[in-house]
Structures are given as C-alpha cells and as structure tokens.
Amino acid sequence: MSTTLIKGGTVITATETMDADVLIDGEKVVALAARGSQKWKGDKEIDAKDKYVLPGGIDVHTHMELPFGGTFASDNFETGTRAAAFGGTTTIIDFAVQAKGGSAMEGYEAWRAKADGNVAIDYGLHMITGDINEQTLKEMDALMGEGVTSFKLFMAYPGVFYSTDGEILRAMQKAAEIGATICMHAENGIAIDVYVEQALKRGETDPIHHALVRKSLLEGEAAHRAIVLAELTGARLYIVHMSAKEALEEVKAARDRGLPIFAETCPQYLYFGLEEMGNGFEGAKYVCSPPMRDRAAGHQEALWKGLATNDLQVVSTDHCPFCFDEHPELGIQKKLGLGDFSKIPNGMPGVEPRFEVTYQGAVNQRGFSVNRFVEIVATTPAKLFGLFPKKGTIAPGTDADIVIFDPKKKHTISVKNQHMRVDYSAYEGLEVTGKVETVLSRGRVIVDGSDYLGKPGDGVFLKRGVSGYGG
Ligand code: URP
Ligand code: ZN
Ligand code: ZN
C-alpha cells in the first residue's frame, strides 16, 4: 500500500472547514491534522496550498448508453465516467433498464456487463422498473440483495417506461416493505401526449413546443399524486429532475407534514429557460423532460431558493447526451426530431460541468457556503442512496475520493475543452470561477490538470445499502 499526503489545503466537508493535511493509505483516508502540525511524509505528496480539498462529487442520476427514441445516449460508461472524473465527480449512480415484457434482473445484469471493466470511477445502479408485475415485485427483493436499493418509475412516456397509478401503488407497497427508495419521474404523460398531438396538428413542430406542451402544472400534479401514493404506502420517495415550482411546492408541503419525501434538481433547470429552447432547431440541444421553464414565471428562482433552504436536497445531472449533428458511429440523434419535436431524443449532457457550474451558481453568485455546496453535490446524495460514510465526505476511514479545487481560477466552459462524447456544450461560453484541478479516486490520482491518469475499469460496482434517510 502506498501513502499519499495532501498538504497545505483547506478541507471542506458538509459540516467542517479545516486548514488541514490529509493522509491517505492505499484507498482510504487515514488521518487529518491541522495544517503543518504533523511531520507526515507520503510516498506521493500533493501541494494544495490556496486550494480547497473537497469530497469527490456524487451524481446520482446518469444515463450512459440509455436506449431512447430510436437511438442511444452518446456517452458510454467509459467516455461518460472519464468525463465525470474531469468534472470532479468520483461516483455515479446510473439507471439500469427493465424493458416492457423483460426481467428486471436481466436488465441489471445487462447494465453490469456494459459498465464493469469500463468505468473510470465507482458506480452504483438504480433500476428503472418499466414493467411492474408479480415477477418484477419478486425481483425487487433480489435486486436489493445486489445493492440496487432504489427503483425508478415513470408517470411520463406512455407506451415506453410509463407505469399506471395502480402499478406505482404496488411498487411503492413493495418498496415500503423492503426499505427501498422510489425515484419518480413526475410528469403527467397521458395529459402531455394530448397536448403533443394537438400541437403537431397545428403545425407546431419546433423544439420550443416540447417545453410548451409539458406544462409545469402537469409536473406539479404528478408530484402531488406520487406523494399521495407514497403517503398511503409509507414509501420513501425521491422525485428526480424537478423543474417546476408547482412540484417543489408539493414537496415542501409533504416535508412539512413529516413525510420522507426528497427531491433533486439539475443544473440545466438552474441555468436555462424558454429562451434557450426558442432558437429554431438549435433548441433541440436543450430538449429534455421535464423541460426548461419560463424564467419570468419564477421557476428557476424557486429552485435556487429550494436548494438554499433544503426543500431541495440534491443537484444531479440526468446526464443523457445526444449529438446535435450526425455522428459517424451513433448516426442521427437530435436531428431525428427535425420537423417533429416529439421525435427529438430527450436528454442533455451534464455529468462533466455539474460540479463547476453548481459551484458558480450557488457559491459565487448566490452566497451559499462551500459546505452547503458539498452537501448538495456529494454528502446528501451519498446519504440518500446508501453510500455514506464510505463516500460523500472526508474523514478517517472514508474512501479517498477527493477533488483539489482552485476557487480562484477562472475558465470558460466549452465543447472545445470538454470530455463528454457529444458535439456541443449547453453552457458554451459560460465563464466560471473555480476549477477542478486534481481528482483522486480511492487514493489514486486519475485526473491531474488536463491529464487523465486512469484507465477503463479503475472504477468498481458499489453495492449500496438502504437510504440513511426517512426510516
Ligand atoms: O429527458 C430526459 N430526462 N431524459 C432521460 C430520461 C429521463 O426521463 O430521466
Ligand atoms: Zn426521468
Ligand atoms: Zn433521467
């Protein structure tokens, strides 16, 4: 086992800010001490003077290689997790898929086969249970045994991943019984599909109409219904990729009633609005579900406020990239929807910029403490999804997943310097202050400035425990 000493930096966790040296032995943090107070030597030493030493980011919502709309998300586990590492994320939780008529266990095994041996960083899996039946409910037990302790259901996408209220109720009853978490895509897909059909009939085919038909009230309604079903069954509910203030109001009210209801938002909803979607077909770059919302209606500011007050607990990405122009291997992706917005594959790239753009918006622009930033991008995700304290903080005994972050360095987010396998950056030209400089994954430096020092297969599958929140 070799030792690594990170010296001279400021260690920031969700609860502490310490001028401290960090000693790593092999894969684990073994000790912290006041800066310079110990005569420690490391086989390898990293100078973190004037830098922050932060827990590696945890992105609990990614879709590498997701089949969607006749194509596949353009990042595979190798390219997507390497890009994540460059962006300061050292753990992802991706979504394995049970197809309609298929077995959940087979979906899990297929996702393990795609990821194992290819991932640059550690990863866990949630399960998209796209077909709730007796067999699936039994398989939920087996999946819990594999460390897949959360299951995603969809109130959107009828005919694809959609579950009826009855199916949701049954899955929630089972989740409550076994201690699993239900992740919910809360949009009323049945009503949305009526608006889609009507818009297309009127000749409204541009990407902006994707946002206009997916009304924020229908996100709020679905969130309400999901919360009622969770309350009836006693299930722990985590509402994913929240973009509407109406949905946030439902979560707030439920939490005020003491229910174990949690929610995440994503950087795209914190940065973008209808303006980005209205630029002709360029708007396809921002097509994802739920959609960007009208800034003037106050959705974005409500989400930031929710993060400030802990009504919202997590920033994840919903990373699901599709190329704008035809790709030599992947073929046509976003442009499948030229002339019909409903055929644009839903999803955006985000796993790489999440850490830095969230820091920019939260700490630099809105005065969040760095501790709160760490909490929403690493610590709470780890706690909610059964990875804490192995992941999500820096303390003796934790995995040495660490980001050395220069809080003063200015740089510009661009497709030219990103590592995600996609031909655009949604944040093109955004100047941010604060840069991920060095990334350690279980004690090994895998990113050093612009150099990648890791290899596919460095990461391992994480058998997760049950959530640390909500009984
Ligand atoms: O548009 C999105 N969100 N694509 C990924 C699939 C999902 O709903 O999370
Ligand atoms: Zn979703
Ligand atoms: Zn998603």
Image (cartoon, rainbow, N blue to C red):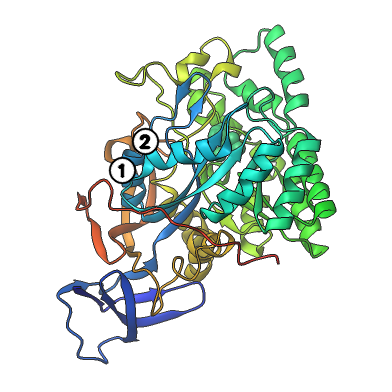
The answer to whether marks 2 and 1 mark residues whose Cβ atoms lie closer than 8 Å is yes
Q: Is residue 367 visible?
A: no
Coordinates of residue 102 in the picture (x, y in percent)? 58, 29
Element carrying mark 2:
loop
Q: Which mark is residue 284?
A: none
Coordinates of residue 428 in the picture (x, y in percent)? 39, 37
| Vertical placement of residue 82 versus 367, above or below | above
The residue closer to the viewer here, 149 or 391, is 149
Single out the mark in the foreground, 2 or 1: 1
Circle 2 residue? 76
Circle 1 residue? 118
Which tag, 2 or 1, sits closer to the chain's start? Answer: 2
Coordinates of residue 85 in the picture (x, y in percent)? 33, 52
Element carrying mark 1:
loop
Considering every residue shown, the one lying at the far left of the view is 43
Residue 420 falls in image quadrant: top left
Q: How many marks?
A: 2
Q: Answer with left or right where residue 136 lies relative to residue 369.
A: right
The residue sitting at 73% across, 50% down in the picture is 174
Q: Amino acid at mark 2?
A: Asn
Image quadrant holding the N terminus, namely: bottom left
In which quadrant of this rendering is ligand 2 seen?
top right
